[in-house]
Image: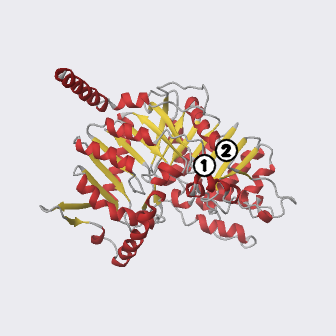
Amino acid sequence: MIKKLLFLALFVFVLSYAVQCLSLTEVFDAIPAASKINSSIKFDAQTRARVMLLTKNMEAWYARWIILANAKKSIDITYFIYNKDIFGKSLMGLLLKKAAKGVKIRIMADARGTKGFIRSFMGSDLMQELVQFPNVQIRAYNPLLKNLPMILIKGIKALLASNHDKIIIVDGKWVIIGGRNISKNYFASPKDDGTVFRDTDVVVNSNKIGKISKIAFDEEFNSMKNYKITKDLFGNIISRKEELDFARKIMETFMVNPEKVPSMIKDNELLDEMCKEIRKYPRLCKMKEYTKKFFEYFNYQSDTKYIYPVKILDKHSAVGNNRDDISNNLVKLMDACKKEIIIQNPYVVITDLAHAALKRANDRGVKIFIHTNSPVSSDSLVTQAIFLRDWMKLLKEMPNMRIFVMKNANKLHAKVFVFDGQVSIVGTYNMDYISQDINSEVVTTVNSNIFAKEVTASIMNDVKTSSVEYKIKVQPDGKIKVIYGPAQHCDESLLKKLKILGFFAKWARKLI
């Protein structure tokens, strides 16, 4: 009997070890392809696609403009934030032009992240111009007044639930997914504005990936929780068409030849203001050169470089249909790692699920590398307040972990993971409870050591040029001595505010 028990225990140990030691490729292959809820639609486990990494702000803007400007049949676009600056208005102007040409357009904006574009009272809605066309549909995601009853069913998470997806799908084959919203904060050069975000997107060219991405878009766009933007009851009282047309023409001109954009328009105040605004970004003028580079990269007549196995992973919000292809698969990838986990993320409030996976990896000897914001770079003081309570404990619990933070006002917004230099994830998913439990999210997963090297190189460049490392030493009595931390590079008054904020924020940790 004892021999049988010993044999059973040994069998269980070997089996658990074997499962733990699955290769990243095996885990990648096992991740289910996206499909409609309760649908039989399936996609190949190894969908291969041409992928381009976008780490530079201006190139990310050019890529969007190129793809949208060349749309022939359809455009699906969803963002958390659309700002009413020259970038937001010119994008709407471009969509307006495509709508007039008959391109089928669907736009979704989050009701919390985007406000100026989706208020329709008395014509203040700039998107009102687009819904004049029968081929255009616009939705506001989970507006508060429409979905107040959901609070009684799903609690405060239903009130906070946002569509955090950032997706562009053009003609069913061009897809852009990543961390960027539509605003100068994501597309202006940091040399023109030192406070803009450092972010990451990918462009994927594939009909199959287009179909999968469309499923992610459709499931949110067709939600009954959304508000349909329609024409004004009494007609389009205040027309914004001229404003949007001006913005598009100014942007198109400036990106190719800024000298043709006049410095002053005496007889048109609105046009004059937009010309002055775009001149704040003098480096946004390399569109012609980039367009050639872009199409050379995606030229199908070239070799098979830049063609990798790709999967789109989707997650619904707290008011959605309970899809979450991301959170547990991140854990599976962490559990499969044997050497290194690299995480670049702006908002690090480690969840219980992620903490357990990282601790298991640490205990196996896996190196863990986290790059995030500091108090001087973050746009979320509440998140930083929690992070400042956590970072020392994380380093103590996981001695194989290293933490690097941005040291200046150039904010980090990229949401990127690299596992053992093989599997990369780029998308909208933050390392916090909001992404795990509350918001909708979407990511692109790529299985390629070549692509992983490119992603890793961009992160390491950020670390080398813009970051400092937080370090501690654990004393013999278990106490922590800070070698280098926030106090060594941040304003003392700011740290005091964050300490107070952190005391109160800890009670709402799972809502942050």
Quick check: can you spot residue 233? yes
Q: How is the image coloured?
A: secondary structure
Query: Does 409 sit above or below residue 23?
Result: below
Q: Give the distance between the C-alpha atoms of the residues marked 2 and 1, in whole angstroms.
A: 9 Å
Q: Amino acid at mark 1?
A: Val
Relative image position of residue 423 (x, y in whole percent)? 38, 36
- The kind of secondary structure element at disc 2 is loop
* Left or right of 151 on screen, residue 233: right
Picture residue at 60% right of the left edge, 25% below the top: 40
Closer to the chain start, of discs 2 and 1, is: 2
Res. 124 image quadrant: bottom right
Camera-nearest residue between 258 and 472: 472
Which residue is depicted at the point 41% across and 31% down? 28
| Element type at mark 1 | loop
Pair 2/1: label in front: 1
- Residue indicated by mark 1: 319
Above or below for 420 versus 94: above
How many marks the image carries: the answer is 2
Question: What label sits on residue 303 in the rendered view?
Answer: none
The residue most toward the left is 476
Q: Position of residue 162 (x, y in %)?
A: 58, 53
Left or right of residue 309, residue 158 in this image: right
Query: What residue does disc 2 label?
Result: 223
Query: Which quadrant, please, contains the N terminus?
Result: top left
Residue 275, by quadrant, is bottom right
Regarding residue 252, the answer to whether it shows in the image is no
Residue 352 in the figure: left or right of residue 219? left
Mark 2 in CB contact with mark 1 (< 8 angstroms): yes
